[in-house]
Amino acid sequence: MTDLAVRRLLVDMERPIARHWCAGDAFRSALFNALSMSFPVGEQFFIDSVRGGFKALPPGEQARFAAEVQGFVGQEATHRRLHGLYNEHLGKLGLVNHWEQRARERLRLLEGVDIRHWLAITAANEHFTAILADFMLHNPDLLGDQDPRLATLWLWHSAEESEHKCTAFDLYKALGGDERWRRTWFRRVTFIFLTDAARQTVDNLRRDGTLWSWSTWKSAASYLFGRRGLVRLTFKPWKQYLRADFHPAQQDSSASDRWLREHQDQYALVGR
């Protein structure tokens, strides 16, 4: 089991966010803003899934997961709160969060469904956030230095996502989750996640007035498919989830450990 600390990030989320806070780059700012828009509803679903999975365990198994589940819930609740504050600033910039509304409509379809499906969906999303997190932790300069507060927020969030990437997966397995459904939900989540991310990013750019700028598409091509491109560097770890013997712990977490160790002045421990 993983020992998960709950941390309070020492950043001021009251100050406004600049339109192109991410290195002055319209595309990167729009993409990260889109991802932030998905987090409050997504993190709440992950919390509900893990809590539900924990309650479904036999009493003898609950003791094994109790501390980890408590840490997971604490970390995700903190992420949800801070990204909620972040998203309030985005609304003031004229951006509209369509991703959250679409997600809420889909989640209503899961009411009454076996909790193992909830956990499979959560584990799939956690894999996405973990591989994105590892990419960001290895390429922190791509966040730029125009807003150190937001760079810290994204890197802290990344470190904790990497830290708790096994929780939903292990609960799914402990409840006898089926391998076929695990991979099926991963394929579905891949399609939904990428589609929603693209739609929200495009809408953010449209409202920002930079959708049809040549520099926007040049930046998108470089950031996604360049030498240090997001898609290029995350495809292999993405694909590993489809292996029958896959476990999230097989993927390196040293970048997360290193960031948390080297930036202890950026957060305060709340509890374990």
Image (spheres, grey):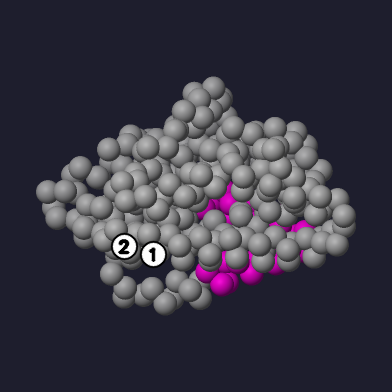
Mark 1 — residue?
Answer: 184
Q: Position of residue 61 (x, y in %)?
A: 16, 48
Q: Nearer the viewer, residue 60 or 224?
A: 224
Mark carried by residue 8: none
Q: Position of residue 112 (x, y in %)?
A: 31, 75
Q: Is residue 94 above or below residue 66?
A: below
Locate residue 158 relative to residue 197 in the image: left or right. left
Answer with the quarter of the image where residue 177 lies.
bottom left
User: In the image, what residue occupies the spot 53% across and 65% down?
Assistant: 191
Locate residue 101 relative to residue 269 in the image: left or right. right
Q: Which residues are magenta?
A: 80-103
Mark carried by residue 180: 2
Q: Nearer the viewer, residue 263 or 81?
A: 263
Q: Amino acid at mark 2?
A: Arg
Q: Is residue 26 visible?
A: no
* Circle 2 residues within 10 Å: few <14, some 14–19, many ≥20: few
Q: Position of residue 242 (x, y in %)?
A: 40, 53
Q: Residue furthest left?
A: 60
Q: Is residue 162 visible?
A: yes
Tell me how far mark 2 sits from mark 1, CA to CA. Answer: 6 Å
User: In the image, what residue occupies the spot 22% across and 57% down?
Assistant: 175
Locate residue 257 relative to residue 92 in the image: left or right. left
Q: Amino acid at mark 1?
A: Thr
Answer with the quarter of the image where residue 139 lies.
top right
Q: Secondary structure at mark 2?
A: helix
User: In the image, what residue occupies the spot 46% across and 66% down?
Assistant: 188
